[in-house]
Image (tube, rainbow, N blue to C red):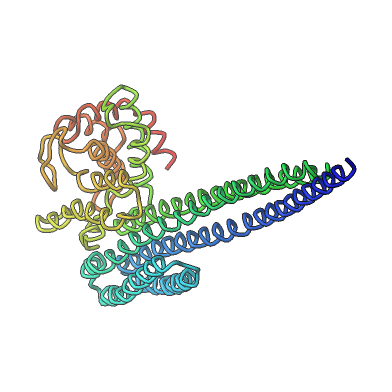
Amino acid sequence: MNKLSKKTSIKVFIAVLVMGIIGIACIGILKFDINRLATNYEENITTAFETKGYMDDIQKLLYMHQAMVAGHIVTNDEHKKDIYSYDETVTREDIKRTLNELSNAEFTEEEKALVNEIKKDVDNYLSHVDEAIEISRVGQESEADTYVSENLTPHITRVNETMEKLEVLVSKQISEGRRKMDNDILLARISAILSVGALIFTVFVGVLISMRLTVELEKYKSDLEQDVERQKDELVERNNKLIKIQDNTVMGMANLIESRDLETGTHIKRTSAYVGLIAREAKARGLFTDTLTDEYIELLVKAAPMHDVGKIIVPDHILQKPAKLTKEEFEIMKRHASEGGRIVREVLSGVEETDYIDIAFDVATYHHEWWNGKGYPSGKKGDDIPLSARIMAIADVFDALVSKRVYKDAFPVDASLKIIKEEGGTHFDPRLADIFLDLKDEVDKIINET
């Protein structure tokens, strides 16, 4: 009996010792899994978000660089050309520096190939910029604009397309990091269960240690999830900043073109305000409900400043002529509508969302069409004219009437509204013209504020 008890005790002791060793081993595995979870996930996430940051910076710099090149081409002031040249050189160096930083990041072979494509297209773009600026320097603005459209824009488009591919791979890295984190958490939880089970057969202290480590694991998980949310918030903030830069650049382009027409910048502010008034009132009256959503109206107001972007191709002596244009001059002036649509498609493609580009294209191309079909460039009539262009037509004509131009004095508001009323059904959509006439108080307020 004693021998049996002794043998039993030894067996129990060995069993407890083995379970204790298993428990301690599981604790070590648990600790290792926790450390690997923190290290691997932080490395993956940090690398992915740094890469995304470099790509955002490159797109922002290229967008700014295009605006500087455009400014250099359209201005006839040599002093301004020198300023644009200096700014272009500084931005060019920033682009190259950021590209080098992007190239030095850790990539897979597939990602490296995409980065090399981006560098190649950016280098080609920059090499053609010098040619465009040289053409502009000798006074050939139209040729420079054509050269930009044919040689620079395709490279920028390819850069944006390649960056989208790279961003997909980066997003896969983030997803893969999350997957690995979940796997590590699963393994860690299994280790925790084994630890608790093993240490139950040893000592109560082991149970407490396992429980403590389990709590620590949950804390690590919580901290990592908070870190992911924080970095997501940073990405959203960076994206919002990029959108703001894009909006400011578009408005800058519109102001730059308007300045060639000897305007002060108030024309695009007022016309955008008129467009918003008309669109919102039409929606409130239940008109055009299939089109006039809140999102559509927001994009329309944002697109309104682009309506005369095509005037970039019109020579200054025509834009600033203080007398009636000749037939030949008017034909050149009319080209700004179709050219405006082309510029919107080429410059904003890959940068702005599709819905905004479509509305900006319609506004730039068709805002000189007439309700009776006698407008240009396509002779569209009635409801065949896009709604955005019909609204823009009223805003543009009215502001032109009440504003002083090189070829005329400003008309009184009442006289201008009378013209809008008389041309409802011929020049303008009669429903929209009636709405605008009913908004006289709001129109007066906009005029007084600008």
Instruction: Please say whether residue 223 is visible from this viewpoint.
Output: yes
Tell me which corner region of the image, top left, top right, bottom left or bottom right, holds residue 287: top left
Q: Give the quarter of the image for residue 197.
A: top right
87 vs 99, nearest the viewer? 99
> Residue 1: x and y, percent?
88, 40
Task: Point out residue 301 in the picture as x, y percentages from the top left corner.
Answer: 35, 41
Which residue corresponds to the image point at 45% horizontal and 51% vertical from the top-left? 244
The quarter of the displayed image where residue 120 is located: bottom left
- Residue at horizontal 22 percent and vertical 63 percent from the top: 315
Q: How many numbered marks are there?
A: 0
Task: Reply above or below: 192 against 394.
Answer: below
Q: Can residue 80 be seen here?
A: no
Relative height, residue 327 to residue 61 (above, below): above
The single residue placed furthest to the top in the displayed view is 285
The reply, left or right, for residue 205 in relation to residue 435 is right
Q: Is residue 264 above or below residue 444?
A: below
Out of 148 and 375, give the one closest to the viewer. Answer: 148
Quarter occupied by the C terminus: top left
Residue pictured at 62% horizontal, 59% vertical? 39
**370 left or right of 19?**
left
Q: Residue 157 location, x and y as percent?
A: 30, 61
Residue 135 left/right relative to 425: right
Task: Give how far across and how far down residue 6 sits, in percent.
Answer: 87, 46
Residue nearer the viewer, 368 or 191: 191
